[in-house]
Amino acid sequence: MALFLKVRKELGRWRAKLSSVPWMFLGAVQRRDYDSGRPHSVKITLGKQPIADDVAILVIFPRAGIPASTFSTLAHFARHGIACVVVSNAPLREEDRERLGEATHLVIERPNLGYDFGGFREGILTLFERGVRPRMLFLMNDSLWFPLRTDCDALARCRQAPEDVFGFLLNGVPRFGVSRDYVQSYFLRFSPRLLASEEFLAFWRDMPLIDNKHLVVRRLERGLSRHFVRRGYTLGALVHWRTVIDRLMTLDDPDKLSRIFAYQCRLNPKDAARLQPLIDKGWSPLRIRDALAGPIRRKRLFASFPLMHPEFVLELGLPALKRKLPIQYRELVRLGLDTDFEPAVRAEMRL
């Protein structure tokens, strides 16, 4: 079974690579076509909120209206004095456009090209073209529930952090014993130093519009961090992937470890292929963890921290949870960990 899963994953990886090859060339072509048609294809609506020194761009893809938690997100930014720009990668209903306009400075509707990065790019270009040069800029997509709690201090901590590219999670891709760190792109904050540079606008202006998820992750999500690191800028995040591994390897509560392992087996078949046989043998959680220390440290197990057991994720300080992960929030609700969550977030989790 383990060999079958490994072969299937490898074949899938190569299929993704091959399908991305044309976009290495088409991305620049699509960007030029998109830019030439922007005056006609992009709709900009001025909202009722004033501009501010710090700005957040929220990219959404509304399939059936705007969820209440999106307005909680906008209100949270506003409470912290951050002006919001919403970029929709799909046409908005009139009532949604009007309601978003009440809570934002700008509402932008655009063709869905380039996924979230295409939306981030449009928001940034629009701001700069309108003469808005933010002191600090936040980028976020609607794959997150954020904030989870009204008293969340994540924005304050992001503002105080000295790094140039900052986010919720600094991830790493270990290869040949070397980790290439990058800030996960569902939430990014750029420093005043970086925003004042010519390199910042040049990155977004020249960015290809890629409609291939594999290449977007590799070239844009990971590539953004590496692009600016090569130019002398720094990376940081509220949670570091090495901290996640260290915490897991020093956790001495067998009941908590048992919950983490049982959950991971339901979440990820590849991880289950390693964990479940040891669980079935009756090994203790601590023994299992220590026996699998090598794969854990090399990120062959528990590779995606935001998807892990919600108790563990929240304890390490991640201030958001991914949407569309029913297994995670069913476990969260079962343990009663959502009792102090934002009402809109709690209601959507329990649907």
Image (tube, rainbow, N blue to C red):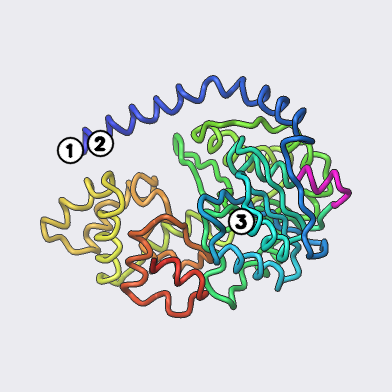
Amino acid marked by disc 2: Leu
Which quadrant is the N terminus positioned in?
Answer: top left
Mark drawn on residue 5? 2
Is 3 above or below relative to 276?
above
Asked if residue 199 is among those painted magenta in the image, a careful observer would answer no
Q: Secondary structure at mark 3?
A: strand
Instruction: Mark 2 and mark 3 in contact? Answer it, CB < 8 Å.
Output: no
For disc 3, the marked residue is 167
Is 219 above or below relative to 43?
above
Q: Secondary structure at mark 1?
A: loop
Residue 30 visible in the picture: yes
Q: Disc 2 and disc 1: Cα gap in Å?
A: 6 Å
Instruction: Mark 2 and mark 1 in contact? Answer it, CB < 8 Å.
Output: yes
Is 147 above or below relative to 231?
below
| Spot occupied by residue 324 in the image (x, y as percentages of width and height) | 42, 55
If you read the primary sequence from the N terminus, does the residue marked by circle 2 or circle 3 appear first?
2
Q: Residue farthest to the right?
A: 131
Using the image as rendered, state which of residue 305 and residue 22 is in the foreground: 22
Using the image as rendered, state which of residue 244 and residue 124 is in the foreground: 124
| Spot occupied by residue 83 in the image (x, y as percentages of width and height) | 76, 62
Which quadrant is the C terminus positioned in?
Answer: bottom left
| Left or right: residue 337 compared with residue 35 | left
For disc 1, the marked residue is 1
Which segment is the magenta one? 124-132
Which is the main secondary structure of the residues drawn in magenta?
helix
If you read the primary sequence from the N terminus, does the residue marked by circle 3 or circle 1 appear first?
1
